[in-house]
Image (cartoon, rainbow, N blue to C red):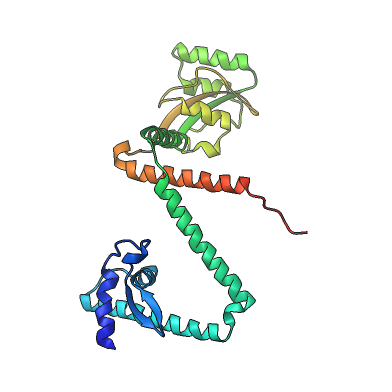
């Protein structure tokens, strides 16, 4: 028996030419006249997600264990069928769920194999990454808040004339809104959306050329510093990016199926 099992272990490591092509799927042995196919043995061992590490003897031991387990599965499940457990409601529900789960994975694999990603889609995805990097960059700002737009325009005119931002900040900002000598690092989630948008258009040491309106008043903003998030070159992340685009397309397919389906609660 041991020699017989050992003779089967090499088949696990051998790739099945085509598990979808039944004539090429060899019958390895029989359990009470039930044929055990090579693909069944390979699938079971692969499903255990065992890494092909260790010595040859260790790998053979793992493979023999899979064969023994598979024999037990067939023998014990056959006994369950003899007792009619395959007609038990809970068992039938579990079998149906397992069947649907396997079919779902097969369909997802088919979708994934058929999804293509164009160079244009890669460029668009890369542009979005760069946009997100800009939006999520940390920054330090100085911010003058006034009550009227004309006052903000007056401040901008003085900045264009060469006045220092810090001097104008001390003169125009009301008490409680004056910035300290060294402002804290911030990000877009910590400021008003209007301010975040304005900052994205600024380079370091630039100020807003138009007043920014928020619920607190009119702002003139100076970008003191910015930590730009480094984005790798497209060629360096092209494969990863292609995978992300395919994942997004697959998600769109699933969402379309959900939108077309009739899903409702029972009365």
**Residue 216 position within the rendered picture, expressed as x and y whole percent measured from the top left:** 64, 28
Query: In the picture shown, does residue 118 fall above or below 84?
Result: above
| Depth check, front residue: 105 or 176 | 105
In the rendered image, is residue 178 in sight? no
Question: Is residue 54 found left or right of 182 in the rendered image?
Answer: left
Question: Is residue 132 found left or right of 3 in the rendered image?
Answer: right
Q: Who's the residue at 52% across and 45% down the image?
A: 253
| Depth check, front residue: 119 or 210 | 119
Query: In the picture shown, does residue 211 fall above or below 130?
Result: above
Question: Is residue 52 found left or right of 92 in the rendered image?
Answer: left
Q: Who's the residue at 59% across and 73% down the image?
A: 92
Q: Residue furthest left?
A: 56
In the rendered image, is residue 257 in sight? yes
**Residue 66 position within the rendered picture, expressed as x and y whole percent measured from the top left:** 35, 78
Q: Residue furthest front?
A: 23
| Depth check, front residue: 126 or 88 | 88
Q: Quadrant of residue 84?
A: bottom right
Quarter holding the N terminus is bottom left
Q: Who's the residue at 52% across and 20% down the image?
A: 168
Q: Quadrant of residue 89?
A: bottom right
Q: Residue furthest bottom?
A: 1
**Residue 54 position within the rendered picture, expressed as x and y whole percent measured from the top left:** 24, 73
Query: In the picture shown, does residue 32 fall above or below 263?
Result: below
């Amino acid at each position: 028996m041991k020699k017989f099992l050992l003779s089967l272990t090499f088949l696990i490591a051998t790739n099945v030419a085509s598990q979808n092509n039944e004539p090429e799927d060899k019958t390895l042995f029989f359990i009470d006249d039930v044929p055990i196919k090579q693909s069944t043995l390979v699938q079971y061992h692969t499903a255990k997600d065992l890494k092909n590490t260790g010595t040859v003897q260790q790998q053979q031991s793992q493979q023999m264990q899979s064969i023994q387990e598979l024999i037990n599965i067939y023998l014990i499940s056959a006994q369950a069928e003899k007792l009619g457990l395959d007609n038990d409601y809970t068992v039938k529900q579990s079998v149906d769920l397992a069947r649907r789960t396997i079919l779902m994975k097969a369909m997802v694999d088919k979708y994934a194999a058929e999804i293509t990603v164009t160079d244009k889609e890669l460029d668009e995805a890369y542009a979005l990454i760069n946009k997100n990097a800009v939006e999520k960059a940390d920054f330090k700002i100085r911010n003058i808040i006034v009550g009227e737009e004309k006052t903000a325009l007056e401040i901008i005119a003085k900045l264009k004339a060469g006045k220092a931002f810090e001097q104008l900040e001390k003169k125009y900002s009301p008490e409680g809104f004056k910035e300290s000598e060294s402002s804290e690092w911030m990000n877009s989630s910590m400021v008003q959306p209007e301010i975040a948008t304005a900052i994205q258009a600024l380079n370091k040491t630039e100020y807003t050329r138009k007043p920014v309106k928020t619920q607190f008043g009119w702002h003139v903003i100076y970008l003191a510093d910015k930590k730009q998030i480094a984005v790798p070159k497209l060629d360096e992340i092209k494969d990863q990016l292609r995978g992300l685009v395919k994942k997004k397309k697959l998600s769109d397919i699933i969402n379309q199926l959900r939108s077309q389906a009739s899903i409702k609660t029972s009365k």
